[in-house]
């Protein structure tokens, strides 16, 4: 386990910024609430076996006592680096993204299952969308009861969604909570 180098940090922050915007600073600057120490410090990002983890500094300090081959994970895995060097957010980052997201899309209750099976969101499925959403922005997909279901990329702006055909794709799927069941072996 090691800190991210400059190139890796830039890639991770760019991806997180796509979803959180200026709220990104709150992810790392907020005081940590986990860890055995009375003052666990702040949160930090660490790389272990091509996966990026979000953990408190106290937890990271204690994990350094464990040999790298024996260490399975530390903190919350938020993404992974591919063999080609690009960074992908995983479904584990959903809680962090939902808490700090700038843009959201709410789904109708009867269409949530389709998204949880890995499908993109058509206009007929979405109930609301944040007003200032542009095409290409990262969005968190929510149920009408404000439960985060997953995240993706807006295929159309909020203005274009109102004029679009009912079958037009509004959000391109990236990850959803159903992956915990569908890709159980790959996630760990």
Image (cartoon, rainbow, N blue to C red):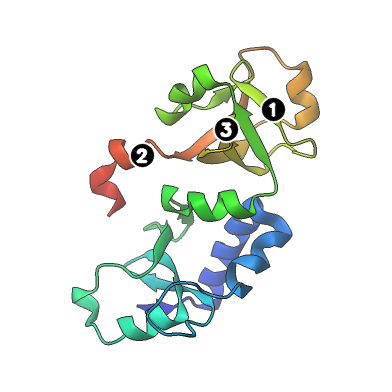
Name the disc covering residue 179, or none: 2
Residue, disc 1: 128
Tell me how far mark 2 sits from mark 3, CA to CA: 20 Å
Residue drawn at x 56%, y 39% is 152
Which quarter of the figure has residue 142?
top right
Q: Residues within 10 Å of mark 2 (few under 14, many from 20)?
A: some
Residue drawn at x 76%, y 30% is 158
Image position, residue 169 (x, y; %)? 61, 23
Foreground mark, 2 or 3, reads 3
Image quadrant in which the N terminus is located: bottom left
Q: Earlier in the sequence, mark 2 or mark 1?
A: 1
Q: Residues within 10 Å of mark 1 (few under 14, many from 20)?
A: some
Foreground mark, 2 or 1, reads 1
Tell me how far mark 3 sits from mark 1, CA to CA: 12 Å
| Residue lying at the far left of the rendered structure | 70
Residue 28 relative to residue 160: left or right: left
- Dot 2 lies on which element? helix
Name the disc covering residue 145, or none: 3
Image position, residue 91 (x, y; %)? 43, 47
Residue 125 relative to residue 56: left or right: right
Residue drawn at x 58%, y 56% is 15
Say how many tags the image has: 3
Q: Earlier in the sequence, mark 3 or mark 1?
A: 1
Q: Earlier in the sequence, mark 2 or mark 3?
A: 3
- Dot 1 lies on which element? strand
Image position, residue 38 (x, y; %)? 45, 85
Please determine whether, in this image, residue 93 is positioned above or below residue 182: below
Please determine whether, in this image, residue 54 is positioned above or below residue 124: below
Q: Are the residues tagged 3 and 1 within 8 Å (C-beta)? A: no
- Dot 3 lies on which element? loop
Tell me how far mark 2 sits from mark 1, CA to CA: 24 Å
């Amino acid at each position: 386990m090691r800190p991210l180098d400059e190139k890796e940090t830039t890639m991770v922050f760019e991806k997180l910024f796509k979803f959180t915007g200026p709220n990104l600073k709150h992810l790392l600057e907020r005081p940590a609430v986990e860890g055995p120490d009375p003052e666990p410090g702040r949160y930090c990002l660490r790389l272990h076996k091509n996966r990026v983890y979000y953990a408190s500094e106290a937890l990271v300090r204690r994990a350094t006592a464990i040999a790298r081959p024996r260490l399975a994970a530390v903190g919350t895995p938020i993404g992974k680096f591919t063999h080609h060097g690009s960074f992908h957010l995983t479904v584990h980052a959903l809680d962090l993204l939902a808490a700090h997201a700038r843009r959201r899309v709410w789904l109708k209750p009867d269409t949530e299952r389709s998204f949880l099976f890995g499908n993109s969101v058509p206009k007929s499925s979405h109930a609301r969308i944040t007003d200032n959403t542009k095409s290409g922005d990262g969005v968190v997909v929510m149920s009408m009861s404000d439960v985060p279901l997953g995240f993706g990329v807006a295929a159309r702006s909020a203005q274009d969604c109102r004029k679009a055909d009912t079958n037009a794709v509004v959000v391109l799927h990236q990850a959803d909570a159903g992956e915990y069941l569908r890709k159980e072996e790959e996630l760990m």
